[in-house]
Image (spheres, rainbow, N blue to C red):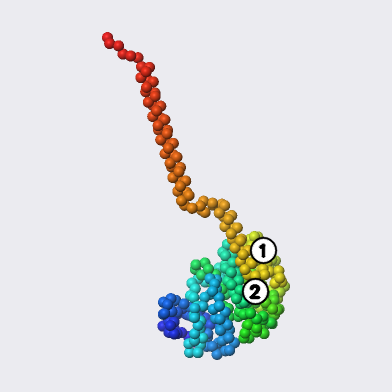
């Protein structure tokens, strides 16, 4: 259903299109009640009459609605227009991580910050029993304010384990979180997803590890010529052997490759553990930086007080010197007067 500027969906006035994909058309809109701009996602016509698409759309809105976290896209409202459901979310300004990576890898400090924010958002979702299952650069948005936002919970697993996997580049499945197919994207799926085994939050940790690798190197960890080969690489290949690994700073390799362990038992056991380690790493980097430029961490008044004290000491020293010089001059005059010959009358 194509919408144009000026169309009205309840209290939402369409301002223009933002994007279009297989699972939705996104528009920029104005909430006339609260006088703010929002993003409005509307199912395409074909999906609006498909039971699985409707179920996935409903599952995504319900999943996101239960979450309230600065690193997860916020949903404000839902509704329907001519029997087509829509969701209203916060309007983000910036670019997707995928678009950003087309220009090259991130610097290590930025990559660590983005990874820690994604992990923080995932930890909040896992606390609610929600496994995203499709963490990848396309589903991460970088705002102009420097915040990472997790998008698209349409294939999230909610509380029930999935069972078997199908094979396609973007692997889609039947309805429900306990579908007979695993849903995800080849190259970012965990080995247990590929094998169709039960999953938990550690599968998102693996996907985040693949994304972290890509942020630091500019190369996908498991990309091959076909989806089937890519899935095979997830099961067998060791990304440590890629030539691009040299781009990863040595002190970051342990974080990345622990996330990418094939066996879930060898990975970070929770996204929260990863957050804590990355935040500790950032704190250590900050401490080292503060030791190199300690004056930046000191309050301005401390420097003002030092300058005032030095000026006062300088003034006292100058006054003392002036007094001493004056005393010496007076003494020399007195001594000169005592030794001068006395004049006599003729």
Where is residue 190? Give x, y as percent: 67, 74
Residue at x-position 65% and y-position 83%? 178
Which residue sits furthest left?
346
Residue at x-position 57% and y-position 75%? 139
Residue at x-position 65% and y-position 65%? 255
Q: Residues within 10 Å of mark 2 (few under 14, many from 20)?
A: many
Q: Residues within 10 Å of mark 1 (few under 14, many from 20)?
A: few
Q: Which residue is mark 2?
A: 201
Quarter of the figure with the C terminus: top left
Where is residue 253? Give x, y as percent: 66, 63
Q: Which mark is residue 90?
A: none
86 or 136, nearer to the observer: 86
212 or 124, nearer to the observer: 124
Query: Residue 241's image quarter?
Result: bottom right
Q: Are marks 1 and 2 in contact (CB under 8 Å)?
A: no
Query: Residue 236's image quarter?
Result: bottom right
- Asked which secondary structure carries label 1, the reply is helix
Q: Which residue is mark 1?
A: 254
Q: Vertically, is 84 above or below 257?
A: below
Residue at x-position 37% and y-position 26%? 330
Q: Vertically, is 305 above or below 172?
A: above
Residue 176 in view: yes
Q: Vertically, is 224 above or below 331?
A: below
């Amino acid at each position: 259903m194509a919408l144009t500027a000026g169309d009205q969906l309840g209290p939402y006035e369409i301002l223009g299109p933002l994007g279009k994909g297989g699972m939705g058309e996104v528009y920029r809109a104005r909430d006339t009640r609260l006088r703010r701009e929002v993003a409005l996602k509307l199912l395409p016509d074909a999906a609006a009459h498909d039971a699985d698409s409707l179920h996935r759309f409903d599952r995504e809105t319900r999943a996101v609605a239960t979450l309230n976290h600065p690193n997860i896209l916020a949903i404000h409202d839902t509704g329907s227009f001519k029997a087509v459901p829509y969701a209203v979310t916060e309007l983000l300004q910036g670019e997707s991580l995928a678009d950003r990576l087309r220009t090259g890898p991130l610097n290590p400090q930025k990559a660590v910050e983005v990874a820690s924010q994604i992990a923080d958002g995932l930890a909040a979702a896992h606390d609610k029993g929600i496994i995203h299952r499709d963490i990848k650069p396309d589903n991460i948005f970088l705002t102009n304010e420097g915040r990472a936002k997790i998008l698209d919970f349409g294939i999230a697993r909610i509380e029930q384990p999935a069972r078997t996997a199908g094979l396609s580049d973007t692997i889609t499945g039947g309805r429900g979180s306990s579908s007979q197919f695993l849903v995800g994207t080849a190259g970012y799926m965990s080995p247990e997803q590929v094998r169709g085994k039960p999953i938990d939050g550690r599968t998102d940790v693996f996907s985040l590890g693949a994304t972290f690798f890509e942020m630091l190197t500019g190369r996908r960890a498991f990309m091959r010529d076909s989806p089937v080969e890519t899935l095979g690489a997830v099961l067998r290949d060791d990304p440590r052997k890629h030539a691009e690994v040299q781009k990863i700073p040595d002190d970051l390799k342990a974080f990345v490759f622990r996330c990418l362990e094939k066996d879930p038992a060898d990975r970070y056991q929770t996204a929260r553990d990863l957050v804590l380690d990355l935040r500790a790493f950032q704190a250590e980097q900050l401490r080292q930086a503060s030791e190199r430029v300690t004056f930046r961490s000191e309050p301005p008044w401390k420097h003002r007080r030092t300058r005032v004290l030095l000026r006062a000491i300088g003034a006292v020293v100058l006054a003392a010197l002036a007094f001493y010089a004056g005393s010496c001059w007076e003494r020399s005059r007195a001594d000169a007067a005592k030794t001068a010959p006395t004049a006599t009358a003729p």
